[in-house]
Structure formats: C-alpha cells, structure tokens
C-alpha cells in the first residue's frame, strides 16, 4: 500500500463525506496497492477513513495479491461464490453496513450489474458519488512514477532505432511488429504489445489500423507507434519510416508538423489550459492546409494501463472543449498527423515547458528499398 496515495485518497474521501471508499478501477488498484488483476470475477479494495484497507478477490488471486502488496488484508472467495455478497459481508462485519460509501461510477469495474448487486446486498449503505476520482488522483506523477515512465520511453527509443536499422523492403508488417515485440521484452517491458504498426495513408485513419500481412514496398510509409509498459506504466512514441528515400515534399511536411508540435510542447507549463495548448496545433494544421478536418484530440494522459477495456486514457485530453489546467509532473502522449505521417512524444509538464521523455531523433526514417 502506497502511503502517499492512501493519504491523497483519504483527503478526497473527507471532502466528499465518505467513510469508506470502494475501489474497483484496475489502474487505481495498482496505483494504491501495488496489485491489480483482471475483472474475470469482481474484485475491490475497501479503504476506510481510519483503520486498515482490505482487498476482496477470488482465492486463486490471493497469493499474488499478498506477494505484491504485503501487509494488505485479504478476504477471498471460491470461484462459485457471489463476489458482491462477499464485498457486502466484509463491510458488514467491520461495522459499515449503514456507512457512507464512496464509489467511482466511471470505473469499468462498476458496471450496471455490479452496481445493482452491491445495492441489493447493502440496502443500508448511503452511496457517495466520486465519479472520476480514480483518474484525477493519479494525474500528477511522483518521482518514482516518472522514473518508470523514463524507462518505458527509453525502450521505445531503442526499439525505434532497431527498426530503422534492420527493416527493409519485402518485410511483412507482421515481421516489424515481431522485431519490436522482441526488443520490448529483452529491454524489460511488461509484454510484447507494440501498438499500431501499419502502412500509412491519409491524415489520421491509419493511426488505429491493424493490417499485418502487407509487405513493404518502395515508396510506402510505415507508421510505427510503440507503447511499451514497465510495471504497467506506458510511454508512447510515433514515427514514420519511408521505404526508400524521403522525398523533398515529405521532408517539408515532416518539418512543418514538427515545428507545430514543438510550439505546442513548449507551451505545456503549469496553469495553461488544455484547450489553449490544443489550439496551438489544431489551428496551425488547419490554417496551413495540412489537414482539411481535425476531429481527434492532440494528446491525452499517460501513466498506468492495466487489464481494462481502455488502451488510452482520455481523462485528460487536449481538444477545443478541454478547460482543465495543466499541473507540474503531469505526463501526456502528444501527437500530430497529416498526409500519411505522424509524430508523437511522451511529454512531462514542467515550469520551463514540456520535457520530452522520448528522446529519439525527430525526423522521418528511411528503410532500405532493396
């Protein structure tokens, strides 16, 4: 259990008049306890304002939970038991049957079904709505979190360099992804999940494409997005690789995109509004004619990613309606794309402007055409 995280959570609970907090948000569980697990069966950590927190989960997961979060009390149940009843019983046995219980209704763990079951088993509880707290409390990164993100960023940088030196025309996109996955694992990443690696075209549709069987040919632009995770913390970077020589027009386009993004990153200081930072890129791309339409965000929160349906965290996203303020040591994935090229960085907010945690060269790469 992280004491600084526990203190921040309890301060938020006091402000919301919650006596106990029910946490079933996978990333919040990892941030607070050091342990997280999939939602195959319902699991939650219960945190009282005073006294010791406890975890409720299936017996199969008890040993890894105790190993990764020593000192945390554990209540476990067999796979055929009612997990929501077990949560309710654990609260009742500790005197919280009629308590004011906080819940994050934005959590993927808090499905309609989970809410219905918990409400049925805890008829005397008064629920406190702390929607979004699991993301808000984690938005500013600690020194140890920043170090972990730097490790992940270094893996991304190294892997991009290996792709640039090894890949040639004739490779399948799948072969490139396999190369990246191998380097991820060798360099200490949690897994070999690479991020989208595709042949690019258009302004943005390729960013989430997934076609692995195509073979690289002269003139193709290989879009590479790498998303290595270290202890669940993900850094991200995008670069384009041209098979053959980068044309003069492509070089001009790349420099335009990078200059716009540099101005955006330089403005990422505490107190800046997210929509103002967004506008620096959005308006420049549209007014220059580099894009005719721009419907995606220009950046979003980076940090913990666990076994949830969310591969990207938009709790802090950069778009025209984003009126929230940047704070020191927030970390974001900032990206721009146009005409088949995309560049992105992992960026930390500092008083001097954005600090790039990804440090690989900011230019389009060239892959041997034969």
Image (spheres, rainbow, N blue to C red):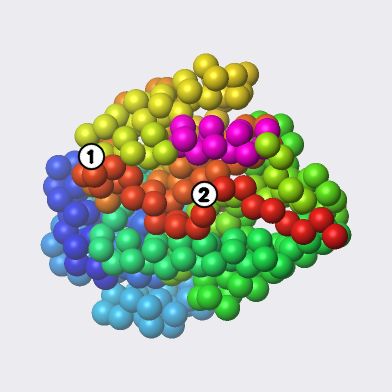
State the residue in front, 300 or 27: 300
Q: Is residue 176 above or below residue 68?
A: above
Q: Where, quadrant-wise, is the N terminus in this rendering?
A: bottom left
Q: Main secondary structure of the magenta part?
A: helix
Asked if residue 108 can be seen in this view, the reply is no
State the residue in front, 208 or 237: 237
x, y percent for residue 312: 51, 47
Which region of the structure is painted magenta? Answer: 249-261
* Residue 352 located left or right of residue 366: left
Q: Residue at x 56, y 48 (%)?
A: 363
Q: Tag on residue 270?
A: 1
Q: Determine the CA span between mark 1 and mark 2.
A: 25 Å
Q: Which residue is mark 2?
A: 362
Q: Is residue 20 above or below residue 354?
A: below
Q: Residue at x 31, y 35 (%)?
A: 267
First in sequence, mark 1 or 2: give its number: 1
């Amino acid at each position: 259990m992280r004491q600084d995280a526990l203190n921040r959570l309890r301060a938020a609970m006091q402000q919301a008049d919650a006596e106990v907090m029910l946490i079933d948000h996978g990333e919040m569980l990892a941030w607070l306890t050091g342990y997280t697990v999939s939602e195959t069966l319902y699991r939650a950590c219960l945190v009282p304002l005073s006294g010791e927190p406890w975890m409720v989960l299936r017996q199969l997961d008890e040993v890894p939970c105790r190993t990764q979060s020593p000192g945390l009390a554990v209540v476990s149940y067999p796979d055929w038991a009612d997990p929501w009843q077990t949560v309710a019983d654990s609260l009742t046995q500790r005197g919280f049957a009629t308590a004011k219980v906080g819940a994050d209704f934005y959590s993927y763990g808090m499905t309609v079904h989970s809410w219905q079951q918990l409400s049925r088993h805890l008829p005397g509880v008064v629920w406190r709505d702390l929607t979004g707290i699991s993301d808000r409390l984690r938005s500013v990164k600690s020194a140890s979190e920043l170090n972990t993100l730097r490790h992940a960023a270094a893996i991304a940088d190294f892997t991009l360099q290996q792709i640039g030196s090894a890949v040639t025309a004739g490779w399948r996109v799948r072969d490139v992804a396999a190369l990246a996955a191998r380097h991820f694992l060798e360099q200490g990443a949690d897994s070999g999940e690479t991020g989208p690696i595709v042949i690019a075209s258009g302004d943005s549709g390729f960013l989430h494409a997934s076609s692995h069987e195509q073979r690289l040919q002269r003139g193709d632009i290989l879009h590479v997005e790498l998303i290595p995770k270290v202890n669940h913390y993900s850094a991200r970077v995008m670069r384009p690789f041209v098979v053959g020589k980068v044309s003069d027009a492509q070089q001009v386009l790349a420099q335009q995109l990078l200059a716009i993004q540099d101005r955006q990153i330089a403005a990422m200081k505490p107190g800046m509004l997210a929509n103002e930072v967004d506008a620096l890129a959005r308006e420049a791309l549209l007014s220059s004619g580099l894009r005719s339409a721009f419907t995606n965000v220009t950046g979003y929160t980076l940090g913990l990613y666990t076994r949830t349906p969310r591969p990207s965290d938009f709790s802090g996203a950069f778009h025209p309606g984003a009126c929230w303020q940047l704070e020191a040591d927030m970390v974001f994935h900032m990206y721009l794309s146009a005409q088949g090229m995309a560049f992105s960085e992992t960026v930390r907010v500092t008083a001097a402007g954005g600090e790039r945690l990804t440090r690989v060269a900011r230019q389009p790469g060239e892959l041997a055409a034969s």
